[in-house]
Image: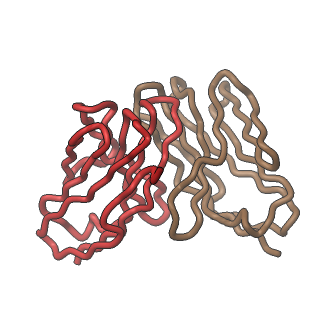
Amino acid sequence: NAGVTQTPKFQVLKTGQSMTLQCAQDMNHNSMYWYRQDPGMGLRLIYYSASEGTTDKGEVPNGYNVSRLNKREFSLRLESAAPSQTSVYFCASSESRGRNIQYFGAGTRLSVL
Amino acid sequence: GENVEQHPSTLSVQEGDSAVIKCTYSDSASNYFPWYKQELGKRPQLIIDIRSNVGEKKDQRIAVTLNKTAKHFSLHITETQPEDSAVYFCAAIREDNDMRFGAGTRLTVKP
């Protein structure tokens, strides 16, 4: 039981390049989330998927797109990376939205030069 | 949306002392308040949570209190140990809404 798995662990991009961060969970959770973590700012929600087939914007969605490929997988895409998107990205999942424990992946450290 | 403020941003205590971290929230509809611990370079992990129908919850050396009227909740760690050193995040969530995190408290426990 791996929990929440994120790939890649590290990535360096040049400004304007695109990439997709992958996330998969094996806990049969309905809800999945993408956060970014910047120094001194805690975790900020980018997008979430309350259930398979739905996605919604969080606090900081600009510059990102997401796809809930199936119940297990939730990907985050940067179409044209900018230096402001340099951050650590965490994927998380929970049984459902609301008052449920969120389990986090190990994170992806992204640098945009 | 919800706004969560967390204090202090850094906290240093001697081993064996207690540590208290406080959070305030703005949305009175928030009804679930988890606390996460994040060690350096690792993922956040839930350490304790409290729901709005409860005023206090304890788990060994960790306790959380909630004052719904004042819209604040606190994490209490007693008999601190060096392995308690980490960044702690509070969060508040309204049912069927996104979760907002505090900015974090870096706790250092000096041996």
State the residue at coordinates (34%, 44%): A59
Q: Position of residue B41 (x, y in %)?
A: 51, 70
State the residue at coordinates (64%, 53%): B7
State the residue at coordinates (57%, 52%): B45
Q: Left or right: where does residue A66 sit relative to residue B3?
A: left
- Vertical position of residue B93 compared to residue A22: above or below: above
- Vertical position of residue A104 compared to residue A72: above or below: below
Chain in red in the render: A
State the residue at coordinates (21%, 42%): A69
Chain in brown in the render: B
Q: Quadrant of residue A85?
A: bottom left
- Vertical position of residue A113 compared to residue A65: above or below: below
Q: Position of residue A8 (x, y in %)?
A: 30, 66
Residue in the foreground of this view, choosing between A26 and B16: A26
Q: Position of residue B35 (x, y in %)?
A: 61, 46
Residue in the foreground of this view, choosing between B47 and B93: B47
Residue in the foreground of this view, choosing between B32 and A7: A7
Q: Quadrant of residue A15?
A: bottom left
Q: Left or right: where does residue B103 sit relative to residue B24?
A: left
The quadrant of the image that shows the C terminus of chain B is: bottom right
